[in-house]
Amino acid sequence: MNLLKELEDSVIEGNEENAKKIAQEIVNKNLDIQDAIFSALLSGMKKVGELYENHEYFIPEIILSADALNVAFEIFTPHLKETKESVKPTVVIGVVKGDIHEIGKNIVSTFLSISGYNVIDLGRNVHSNIFMEEIEKSNAQILCLSTLMSPTLDEMRLIIDKLKEKGLRDKVKVMIGGATTNPEFKEEIGADFYCKDAIEAVNTLNKYFLK
């Protein structure tokens, strides 16, 4: 259990070198990789999010923490066991057109992948037509939209309208997130879910799709 706490602390502190070393030690000792991911990586990043919300952490600290998480996850990935439970729906995720901030989106994308979802990450500044093309091509059941900026909120509304125009709205659940979004905006544009962080995103989708 001390190794898990050390790994969690490494993520919180953004200590990439230490996270890499501890992750490898966890693998060498044949400890439960899934437990390490959820009890150390995800919980550590959740605390980083709380520090950010409390204005104790800022973007540079979040980047360092995300890097520490990613280097540990890369070590864990080859040792993850495939199970029937891990075969989950396809998710298309991206930051909407006009916004280039993708740290939060990257964290959500990573956590969904860790949790067994087939994630197609389109990156940042994604045009609504690109979202449509990828959903049609992949038959995705989930669309995750992110933005940090108020001027780009209307892009989320536009994307949902396009889903309706193409007859895809009933086939795709839409989740929104980002600093400028909230439950009220979710209702206003007709999205299905609003999530404030990656942990909530995973838990929400698991609750809906793993009934």
Image (cartoon, rainbow, N blue to C red):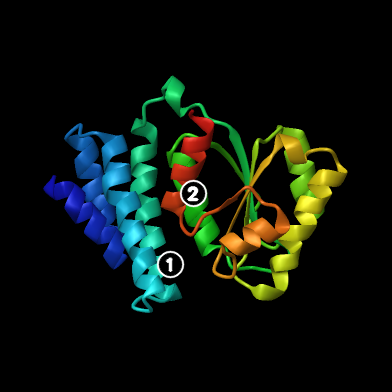
Residue 121: x percent and y percent?
Answer: 61, 48
Side of 52 where 152 appears, left or right: right
Residue 55: x percent and y percent?
Answer: 38, 79
Side of 193 where 46 appears, left or right: left
**Rendered residue at 35%/58% (across/down):** 46
Side of 51 where 98 appears, left or right: right
Question: Where on the picture, by quarter, is residue 135?
Answer: top right
> Disc 1 and disc 2: Cα gap in Å?
20 Å
Name the residue furthest right: 165
**Rendered residue at 36%/54% (across/down):** 69
Secondary structure of residue under mark 1: helix
- 77 over 56 or under it: above or below: above
Please name the amino acid that badge 1 sits on: Ile
- 62 over 39 or under it: above or below: below
Residue 104: x percent and y percent?
Answer: 51, 61
Q: Residues within 10 Å of mark 2 (few under 14, many from 20)?
A: many
**Rendered residue at 71%/32% (across/down):** 139
Residue 93: x percent and y percent?
Answer: 62, 49
Marks 1 and 2: which is nearer the front?
2
Secondary structure of residue under mark 2: helix
Label at residue 63: 1
- 46 over 87 or under it: above or below: below
Please name the amino acid that badge 2 sits on: Ala
Label at residue 201: 2
**In terms of depth relative to the viewer, which is nearer, 141 or 68?**
141
Residue 58 seen:
yes
